Image (spheres, rainbow, N blue to C red):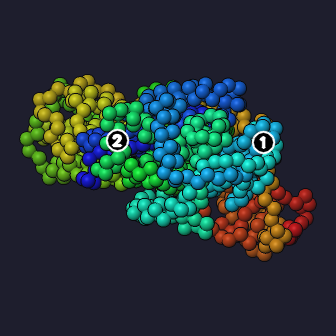
């Protein structure tokens, strides 16, 4: 830790209170933040962990309209569901507040008033979209249309979730209101804007001081500011009736923009936790502020909120913003609207007392530098092949043998040989390796280093074989078992940030009060003669049947989504010149085989009439290799070659896909069409 900081305030992004928590949320910010905070506590650092429900976003009002209830009823429901799920999963917030709380309304109002009185805002009359059917101005999320940058037909008025671009509602092509479905009209209204264009030099200087931030964070910030238009003024108020009322004259029917109001929730939650000394964490230079977020929140936490804090003038700025990328599920983007998610509260019900298995899986597969994929098979493998077979196996053998040989009392190590000393040296070096990775926000590396300690113990027992050696060298076995018990204790210490439930259980089995991080640099934490408790298994195997239940649930979600699904929307129009660049020919599949270690890929050999080439195609779920030999297909022959699983693929088979995701060949109706014939 940087010694100049006496204390650290860690925040995790405030989740919208319009639905439960899913694994994408956990992997994005809550689990890494919790690991980091637990580590800081273990090293004795002064740290506070802040979060709460974001209850003023437009998704709240949309959810309320869909469920024919009030926004307050929605936030009350999901605030409790989320808060309970976080607690049960071991996310150790010091406070989990909410932005509908009175203390937050007052804090946000006061913050706005300071900026207003300092003439930071510009007051502008602009044209905003208005729904004449619903008779109200439309917030950004009440408007959908085609993204001008990637042509996504379902972009929102503030952001395109496909390409990640931040938008203004007026940027959308063919906008429509989500309230009535009608095309909105532009109507004049007055709002208060944060002049980011004028503040850009200060913001840029701040960002450039943090070139050591994660590359995805620093790069996104730089691209925003270095783009042709640079930063633009952004409205900090909205024409809505749900939120924090704008605390100035002539602002009836207006509330604070959710991205002005929400980050102030970190401040109000700290006030709630520490009413007498909250300012120590927000206003003193020896304090450090760290935001854990997902990549879709980078701009708001690195540009807009720091700009607000700068202009207020009394607050420290974020020292780091370690944002993760997105976690996908079984190869598809997590979607709450499609129920394509693993919901935390359902997981906790289905896998009782297995919080740490999910924590371990999400951490070891965290989307730190790129989007990653969660699969139930990988979850099963992580549990059975690592937590059970490596860590759990080592602990179980150690405890069982200690009871078998010494009635549960720790034997005394008398003489260490070279092998013992090397193991103890590696054990003592482990905390520094893990600390370095955690402090650099490399949690995948950190948990891997922790598992390496378990591997060290497993290897040590496997090579020394104390269960055999006890017959010929009892004194040597005492040293071996003492070393194994020291490894076990240090594993409990080092596991706490990652696997807190298992750490506590292991300390209980060892009959030792939990120890802090510094103790893991020692190799004598368990005194000889100490009595350990009876052994229990730390983990149990996850069976195929349990995994199939989860896969069946996802399949049902997929089928439910297809019930009312129609054909996919047309893509944006292209030109004849672009189309004419594609060379599509008739070809015949002359050989086919599965690509090893994949479920979806077939290696096809096709005769184009001009040459014979290899094409790798993701159609194995729908066709058996032996059934498609001799089949005529349409082949894009001038697609640039690329390697797939080490195989060079030259071309692409054209397929038709229905609403259920089923594939069929696009083939000529006459078998006498020659290979090489041009498709026009």
Query: Which residue ends up furthest to the left in the rendered image?
Result: 414
Q: Which mark is residue 279?
A: 2
Instruction: Specify whether 635 is left or right of 17.
Output: right
In the orientation shown, which residue stands out farthest toward the bottom?
610
Instruction: Please provide percent x and percent y for residue 11.
Output: 42, 43
Q: Which of marks 1 and 2 is nearer the N terminus?
A: 1
Q: How crowded is mark 1: few (under 14 residues within 10 Å), some or many (20 or more)?
A: many
| Labelled disc at residue 405 | none
The one nearer the camera, 440 or 396, is 440
Q: Callout 2 environment at 10 Å: few (<14), some (14 to 19), or many (20+)?
A: some
Q: Residue at x 68, y 71 (%)?
A: 640
Residue 477 makes an appearance in the image: no
Whole-percent x and y of residue 556?
A: 68, 33
Q: Which residue is drawn at 82% across and 68% down?
A: 575
- How many circles with numbers are drawn on the protein? 2
In the image, residue 679 above or below residue 13:
below
Q: How far apart are marks 1 and 2 (CA)?
A: 43 Å
Is the residue 14 above or below the residue 648 in the image? above
Residue at mark 1: 131
């Amino acid at each position: 830790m940087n010694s100049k900081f006496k204390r650290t305030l860690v925040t995790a992004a405030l989740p919208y209170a319009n639905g439960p928590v899913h694994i994408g949320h956990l992997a994005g910010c809550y689990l890494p933040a919790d690991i980091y905070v637990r580590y800081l506590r273990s090293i004795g650092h002064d740290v506070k962990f802040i979060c709460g429900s974001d209850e003023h976003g437009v998704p709240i009002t949309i959810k309320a309209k869909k469920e024919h209830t009030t926004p307050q009823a929605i936030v009350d429901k999901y605030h409790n569901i989320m808060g309970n799920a976080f607690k049960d999963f071991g996310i150790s917030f010091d406070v989990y507040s909410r932005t509908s709380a009175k203390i937050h309304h007052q804090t946000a109002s006061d913050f706005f008033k300071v900026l207003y009185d300092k003439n930071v805002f510009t007051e502008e009359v602009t044209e905003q979209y208005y729904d004449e059917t619903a008779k109200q101005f439309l917030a950004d999320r009440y408007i959908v249309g085609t993204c001008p940058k990637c042509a996504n037909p379902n972009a929102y008025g503030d952001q395109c979730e496909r390409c990640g671009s931040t938008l203004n509602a007026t940027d959308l092509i063919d906008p429509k209101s989500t309230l009535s479905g009608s095309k909105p009209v532009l109507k004049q209204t007055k709002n208060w804007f944060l002049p980011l264009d004028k503040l850009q030099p200060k913001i840029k200087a701040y960002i450039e001081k943090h070139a050591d931030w994660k590359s995805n964070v620093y790069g996104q910030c730089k691209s925003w500011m270095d783009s042709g238009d640079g930063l633009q003024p952004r409205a900090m108020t909205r024409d809505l009736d749900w939120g924090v009322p704008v605390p100035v004259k002539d602002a009836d029917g207006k509330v604070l923009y959710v991205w002005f109001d929400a980050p102030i929730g970190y401040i109000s939650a700290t006030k709630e936790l520490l009413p007498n000394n909250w300012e120590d964490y927000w206003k003193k230079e020896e304090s450090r502020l760290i935001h854990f977020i997902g990549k879709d929140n980078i701009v708001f936490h690195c540009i807009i909120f720091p700009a607000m804090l700068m202009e207020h003038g009394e607050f420290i700025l974020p020292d780091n913003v370690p944002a993760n990328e997105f976690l996908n599920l079984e190869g598809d983007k997590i979607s709450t609207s499609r129920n394509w998610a693993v919901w935390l509260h359902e997981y906790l019900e289905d896998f009782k007392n297995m919080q740490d298995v999910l924590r371990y899986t999400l951490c070891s597969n965290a989307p730190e530098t790129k989007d990653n994929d969660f699969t139930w098979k990988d979850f099963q493998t992580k549990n059975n092949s690592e937590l059970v077979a490596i860590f759990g196996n080592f602990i179980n053998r150690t405890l069982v043998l200690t009871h078998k040989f010494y009635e549960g009392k720790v034997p005394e190590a008398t003489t260490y040989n070279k092998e013992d000393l090397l193991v103890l040296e590696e054990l003592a070096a482990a905390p520094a390796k893990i600390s370095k990775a955690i402090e650099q926000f490399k949690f995948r590396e950190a948990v891997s280093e922790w598992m390496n300690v378990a591997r060290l113990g497993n290897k040590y027992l496997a090579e020394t074989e104390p269960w055999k050696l006890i017959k010929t060298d009892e004194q040597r076995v005492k040293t071996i078992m003492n070393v194994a018990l020291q490894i076990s204790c240090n594993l409990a210490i080092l596991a706490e940030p990652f696997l807190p439930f298992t750490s506590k259980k292991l300390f209980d089995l060892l009959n030792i009060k939990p120890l802090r991080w510094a103790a893991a640099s020692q190799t004598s934490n368990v005194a000889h003669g100490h009595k350990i408790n009876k052994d229990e298994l730390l983990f149990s195997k996850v069976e195929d049947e349990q995994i199939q239940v989860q896969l069946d649930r996802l399949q049902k979600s997929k089928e439910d989504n297809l019930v009312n699904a129609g054909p996919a929307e047309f893509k944006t129009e292209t030109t004849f010149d672009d189309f004419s660049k594609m060379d599509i020919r008739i070809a015949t599949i002359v050989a086919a085989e599965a690509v090893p270690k994949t479920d979806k890929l077939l290696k096809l050999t096709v005769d184009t009439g001009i040459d014979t080439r290899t094409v790798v195609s993701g159609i194995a779920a729908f066709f058996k290799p032996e059934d498609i030999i001799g089949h005529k297909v349409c082949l894009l022959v001038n697609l640039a070659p690329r390697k797939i699983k080490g195989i060079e693929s030259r071309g692409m088979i054209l397929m038709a896909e229905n609403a259920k995701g089923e594939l069929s060949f696009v083939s000529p109706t006459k078998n006498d069409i020659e290979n090489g014939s041009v498709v026009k």
